Every structure is written in C-alpha cells, then in structure tokens.
Image (cartoon, rainbow, N blue to C red):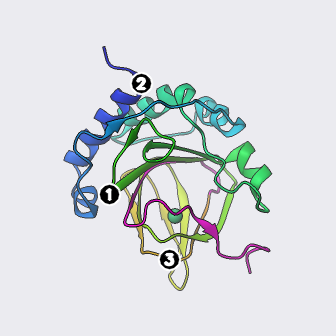
Amino acid sequence: MTDAFENLLNEAQKLHDANAVLQEFGALPVDPKRQVVEPFYIPAAKLMEADTDLFSDDFSSIRDAIIAASPDALWRETYKGTRIAELFRERFGCYCLIGKGGPYVAEDMAIYIVYMPEGLYYPFHHHPAEELYFILAGEAEFMMKDKPSKVLGPGDHVYHPSMHPHATQTHDHPFLALVLFKGEIGMTPVLTFPEGDE
Ligand SMILES: [Fe+2]
C-alpha cells in the first residue's frame, strides 16, 4: 500500500516523464531518501483543501494527490518575521515534497507545492536557486523584474533565473503549482523590497 507522499511522488514522476519542459529543467532525483515529516498545519492549508476553483486540464490526478497529502505535510511559514508573515500564514500555502521539511530529500533538487487563493499578491522576492513553476490548476499572473507579466494556467510554466526578482498575483481564481528548485537549494527566498513593493 502506498501512502499519500509516495503517491504524490509517483504522480510528480509521471508528470515529469510526460513533460519536456520539466525534463529540460532537470532530472528528478532517483530514489530520494525518505525522512520523517512532523506535520504542521496553517490556515492556508485548509483554504487549499476546501478550494473548489482549482480547475485543471490534464493534471487532476496530481492535484488530487497534493490535496490528499496536505494533512500529513509540514506547511511552511516561509516569510516568518517579515511584513507579510500574518497574511501568508492565513492565505499562502507551500509545502515541500523533496527537500528540507519534506518527506523526501535529495542533494541537487527540491520540489515544492505552492497554492494561492484568489486575490492574493506575493510580493517581489528572489533566491539563489533557479526555479521552474509548472501550473497544475487555476490561473495567476506572474511578474519578473524588467519583463512583461504573463497570465498562466494549467500546463503553462515560468522559469526564474538565479536571484531574478519575481512576484505573483492571483485575480479571480486560485492556482496550484509544482515548483522545482535547483542549484543553491538550501537558501530560502527573501523579499526584494522588505519595506514594501515599489
Ligand atoms: Fe521563487
């Protein structure tokens, strides 16, 4: 019998096997080491579980696996101690599948699940790791410094180079994404404008 995390890892592998964009970003770790997760729940996790607007073209099985694993996950408080800490605890959902605090760990890649409900702004932030957002469900506007913003839906992706500031805005819909991190995966994101976006 497989547990919720094993099922989710299998779904991520299936998605990767079928998708050239994910393959170009990098191979998934082979047999990532299993580790014990201390579940940690935040209000944003409940929002995701109850969200009925996570529409999905071809990715409903991984979407459902993400939601099924939610109660066992360590939901992150990524921006604790910053100006967005309270808002994010309530509304921004992120847990790790491979990496620190996740059920699996590997040296060269981390994988996160990211959820935002409708009407939320994730301010400009940056990190040393290269990042690929692959949208599984819903819709959001993605912004990068010095580039035009793009509205992305299921099957779309955006690549963020190392240290390149980026931001996300949801409008009338939520979104759910699989996020791949490579390079300096140990460094957490920081807000580009700690006092407030320009
Ligand atoms: Fe990022």
Amino acid type, callout 3: Met
Q: Is residue 173 left or right of residue 133?
A: right
How far apart in space, not on screen, are marks 1 and 2 (Cα)?
A: 23 Å
Q: Is residue 194 magenta?
A: yes
Q: Position of residue 198 (x, y in %)?
A: 74, 81
For mark 2, what is the residue? 4
Q: Nearer the viewer, mark 1 or mark 3?
A: 1
Q: Position of residue 108 (x, y in %)?
A: 32, 57
Q: Is mark 1 within 8 Å of ligand 1?
A: no
For mark 3, what is the residue? 163
Disc count in the image? Answer: 3
Q: Nearer the viewer, residue 18 or 71?
A: 71
How far apart in space, not on screen, are marks 3 and 2 (Cα)?
A: 33 Å
Secondary element at tag 1: loop
Among numbered discs 1 and 3, the one appearing first in the sequence: 1
Q: Which residues are magenta?
A: 170-198
Q: Residues within 10 Å of mark 1 (few under 14, many from 20)?
A: some
Which residue is drawn at the image coordinates 65% and 56% (left, top)? 171
Q: Quarter holding the N terminus?
A: top left
Q: Residues within 10 Å of mark 3 (few under 14, many from 20)?
A: some
Amino acid type, callout 2: Ala
Q: Is residue 80 magenta?
A: no
Instruction: Please identify the residue farthest to the bottom as the structure is shown.
Output: 146
